[in-house]
Image: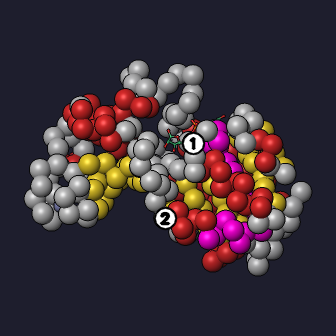
Amino acid sequence: MVQVTQSSKVVVLTGAGISAESGIKTFRASDGLWENHAIEDVATPYAWERDPELVWNFYQGRRNQLQDVEPNPAHRALVTLEKFLGENFLLVTQNVDDLHSKAGSKNLIHMHGELRILRCEECHETFDMMEQEHLTSEYVPCPSCHSQRLRPHIVWFHEMPLQMSEIYAAVEECDVFMTIGTSGHVYPAAGLIDVAKQAGAHCIGINLEPPMNYDQHDEFHQGKAGELLPDFVEQIIS
Ligand code: APR
Ligand code: ZN
């Protein structure tokens, strides 16, 4: 097992699996996503254009769910790792929930956006909007330019993930790269491990099932993140 010192540079990539034990469904679970909607029916700009009401209500459901979920031991273990490494730690999440920040993670990039945030398509401003009045089936107008409806600040299929240059810069110089709870299906996130490997990083995976990019991992631990990660972090930093 790899040892991490305070000067090791570590980048962690998380996916839906890390929030599963908090009660949020993963994307590719056999029980599907949300009331029989395929991801593509609600998570593309075309869906928003064609049926904004459906897409809005879908995301309002998920935004409401944030009020009932709490971080689990896996989210907290990553806070322990960040406290040990300080500036040398970067957490990149594909998750749009707020459980990493709720747990206390600071150096965090939400590459696929955030449920808490709404964005104006006219003036491009973003707003953290989680008051009760923002969580109904009514559209929320832009407080800045007064356009009629904000959209979810979510990176949909066919859209570019956020802060990619920062992410690539960190991955290119990391010593250890970890993937946790992600199936390795969705690019560019699934390809970050290739960048890490090319940069000579030691690549570790923790996942319930072997992910698509399993072969790229130098070390793989199969199981639930909430059960494995707390001990794993204690071991690598001690
Ligand atoms: N602990 C660890 N891994 C788990 C757990 C758990 N408790 N529960 C499930 N998993 C694993 C599953 O085995 C699966 O490999 O987590 C992975 C979740 O995979 P996906 O549902 O495909 O989620 P993710 O990889 O985050 O999806 C990527 O796809 O739909 C888009 O934008 C969306 O960010 C999302 C992206
Ligand atoms: Zn606006």
Badge 2 residue CB within 8 Å of ligand 1: no
In the rendered image, the quadrant that contains the N terminus is bottom right
Q: Earlier in the sequence, mark 1 or mark 2?
A: 2
The image quadrant that residue 177 belongs to is: bottom right
> Residue 77, position in %: x, y?
66, 57
Residue at image coords 23%, 31%: 51
Residue at image coords 61%, 38%: 185
Could you tell me if the residues under marks 1 and 2 are in contact, i.e. CB atoms within 8 Å? Answer: no
Mark 1 Cα-neighbour bin, 10 Å: few <14, some 14–19, many ≥20: few
Q: What's the amino acid at mark 2?
A: Gln
Q: Secondary structure at mark 2?
A: loop
Tally the marks. 2
Q: Secondary structure at mark 1?
A: loop
Q: What's the amino acid at mark 1?
A: Val
Residue at image coords 42%, 44%: 158
Residue 184 drawn above or below residue 231 = above
Image-based side of 16 in relation to 3, left or right: left
Residue 99 drawn above or below residue 53 = below
> Residue 49, position in %: x, y?
24, 38
> Residue 206, position in %: x, y?
73, 46
| Residue numbers of the magenta segment | 169-184
Mark 2 Cα-neighbour bin, 10 Å: few <14, some 14–19, many ≥20: few
Residue closest to the eye, 170 or 6: 170
Question: Residue tagged by mark 2?
Answer: 163
- Residue 186's tag is 1
Residue at image coords 73%, 61%: 196
The image quadrant that residue 64 belongs to is: top left
